[in-house]
Amino acid sequence: MLSRNCCMFSTTYESFPWSTSTYPVSQDSCASTPSSLGRKGERVVFMAISSNRTNHAKLPKNLRNPRRPKLPPDMNYTFKRVLYENDEESTLKPNIDTFIDNDEGVASEASSNGIDEGIIWESDEMEAISSLFKGRIPQKPGKLDRERPLPLPLPYKIRPLGLPTPKRFANVSRQSVSKQVYKNPTFLIGLAKEIQGLSAEENVSKVLSKWSPFLRKGSLSLTIRELGYLGLPERALETFCWVKKQPHLFPDDHILASTVEVLAGSNELKMPFDLDKFTGLASRNVYEAMLRGYIKGGSLKLALKLLSMAKESNRVLDTGVYAKLILELGKDPDKSTLVLVLLEDLAVRDDLNLTPQDCTAIMKICIMLGRFEIVEGLYDWFRKSGGNPSVVMYTTLIHCRYSANNYREALAMLWEMEASNCLFDLPAYRVVIKLFVALNDLSRAVRYFSKLKEAGFSPTFDIYCSLIKVYMASGRLAKCKDICKEAEMTGFRFDEDTMLKLQQ
């Protein structure tokens, strides 16, 4: 069968079999007889195309009547092209003059139409536009003899050419042997140990002579102090005598001060009869070294005598010497008056310069003497001078306020200590637990007791006693028995007298 809309026929002339023409046939023509379509001398060939589509749906509205897109306005971009003929090939290249001519034509046409009649291209503008296509824009000749200012001289550029540039990092391996050993603590302490290994008949020159060319002034002061720590004051004096014979090592004030300090600390320094004349000729370093030696050796009377002589002669000594003397005198309760006199001497000093260790030592002595106001004053001075308190100073101040029964102020110092992220040591835990026991604060006392164990410290006997006391005060006898058992497992024993004291 033939489809209605898909029926095609072609007429082919017999005389021209290669020529074909195809005509569409309407619905009426397909229903008529095929013989009525033929002509004389023609052969009619029907072509039928079958289609499986039975439902002919209409196209959607947007496809039947598509919306015309918005087109840009037509612009006349016509370019004239000039033919360049070469020997080998001919190419078409645009000519810049054609652009200029075209622009002039468009401008004239626009002006004739009345669009804009005020645009007039000048020669300079035309030259600038044409130079965009030809190459670099020609610059107007300026000041040809212009002098540029010289750059500012730099320190590393004004150095004379003949001098070498200094090196920032010196290679230690290329230094001379004397520079490597004359200030090396390991080498100088090794000399003291080598001298210690000598026999009694041998002199120190056996060790020092081979190193003499490599030593400098002040090198052997550390060796002499190390001999004093080893308990060899005679060898220290022999070393000083050997140094006196070396012209490139003596006179040296540092070696003399170290020798005097070692001999005075071991009570081997012989005092001359005319002590005033001797101390008047001594320098400040030697005078202070003698004082430190007598303090270390326990000759406190000689130390006080030297201190009074310095005060009479208006000699200003280091405040660290006063701190060391106060620490030694404070160990004896009968010498508390001397300590107070030295504290008054320190209070009037404008150049007070104490290390944290010396400041803490004086605070401990003042707590033993019951002078708590001096402790507070020293702490305020230390903070105002820009010092950073250590755990020892915090613990000393908390102990001071605990001893003065100022528990709330001691608690405020504890919060300041924790705010500064200061690590607690065993004495700090001891003082803090005693503080909470005095405040009858069981929960905080137990908390810091557990922190003490977590930090890896072993509780002391007084810490166990403090915990038993606070548990008894709260009526928790079972916990008291547990603490007693734990203390006995550690090695402590509680006798009846101790238990009676804890119950009180």
Image (cartoon, rainbow, N blue to C red):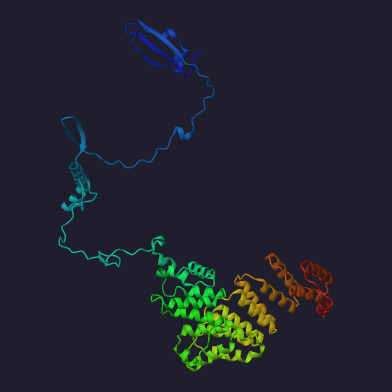
Instruction: Name the residue furthest front.
Output: 201
Residue 153: give x, y in percent of width and height: 27, 67
Residue 230, how many percent across, how many down?
56, 73
Q: Residue, x 44% and y 34% (percent of image)?
A: 65
Identified at 44% across, 9% down, the residue is 34
In the image, 407 versus 51, the foreground residue is 407
Q: Is residue 379 visible?
A: no
Q: Is residue 449 above or below residue 18?
A: below
Q: Report whether 360 appears left or right of 43.
A: right
Residue 180, how many percent across, how many down? 43, 65
At x 65%, y 87%, the residue is 332
Q: Is residue 494 visible?
A: yes
Residue closer to the observer: 141 or 492? 492
Q: Give the side of residue 63 with respect to residue 377, left or right.
A: left
**Which residue extends farthest bottom?**
312
Q: Compared to 176, does 495 lie above or below? A: below
Picture coordinates of residue 461, whole percent (x, y): 75, 73
Q: Is residue 140 above or below residue 218?
A: above
Residue 232 drawn above or below residue 45: below
The count of marks equals: 0
Who's the residue at 54% across and 21% down the image? 54
Q: For this rendering, which residue is in front, 476 or 431?
A: 431
Q: Quadrant of the C terminus?
A: bottom right
User: Along the line of sight, which residue is nearer the eye, 107 or 390?
Assistant: 390
- Residue 378 in the figure: left or right of residue 116: right
